[in-house]
Amino acid sequence: MAGTAPGVRGDLTARGRRFAIVVSRFHEEITARLVVGARAALRRHGAADRDVAVVWVPGAFEIPQVALALARRGGIDALVCLGCVIRGETPHFEYVAGEAARGIADVGRLTGVPATFGVITAETRAQALDRAGGRMGNRGEEAALAALELVGLLRALDGRPARRGAPRRGRR
């Protein structure tokens, strides 16, 4: 159905919220750039450095397991999951990328803690670099902004205040 989007949206307020960035060491020259983009986006929207934890894991396949553990521990408002999978000559790419995507989505569904997908899936290293702060933007920044919006949106849908410490508003 065509028309305008629903009126409920998440704000992009990071102040007073806690984030975990779960990032793959595999292709670290690329994933480190994603972390820079994610941290910069969170800072621009008010996150204090002390409220952003960065947790490195061996590869993209391991991201969901650690993200789930962090979500279940509590104290995290959102998870930003970052990695890079570059196609090779075997079907390994499909397995790793597919399981990372499914696992990250499951974290959000199972725990209610937003977990965003900032895993680059590329055919070549050049394509990955283009998406890690190159001509196609920075997927880390995009994943962090999505996490911010989801935190605000879920709070708005629950009728909770958008910011910690703000007075509670009634449901509409």
Image: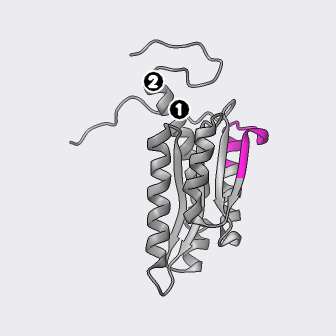
Give the quadrant of residue 62.
Answer: bottom right
x then y, percent, for residue 103? 48, 55
Residue 133's place in the image compared with 157, above or below, is: below
x then y, percent, for residue 5? 34, 37
Give the quadrant of residue 71.
Answer: top right
**Label 1 sits on residue:** 152
Q: In this rendering, would 144 be left or right of 108?
A: right
Q: Amino acid at mark 1?
A: Gly
Q: Is residue 157 magenta?
A: no
Labelled disc at residue 158: 2
Which portion, as a residue range, is magenta? 40-54
Residue 88's place in the image compared with 64, above or below, is: below
Please name the residue shown 55% across and 64% down the image.
61
Labelled disc at residue 58: none
Residue positioned most to the left: 1
Please name the residue shown 58% across and 79% down the image.
126
Q: Earlier in the sequence, mark 1 or mark 2?
A: 1
Please name the residue shown 53% across and 46% down the image.
115
Colour pattern of the rendering: one colour
x then y, percent, for residue 124? 54, 80
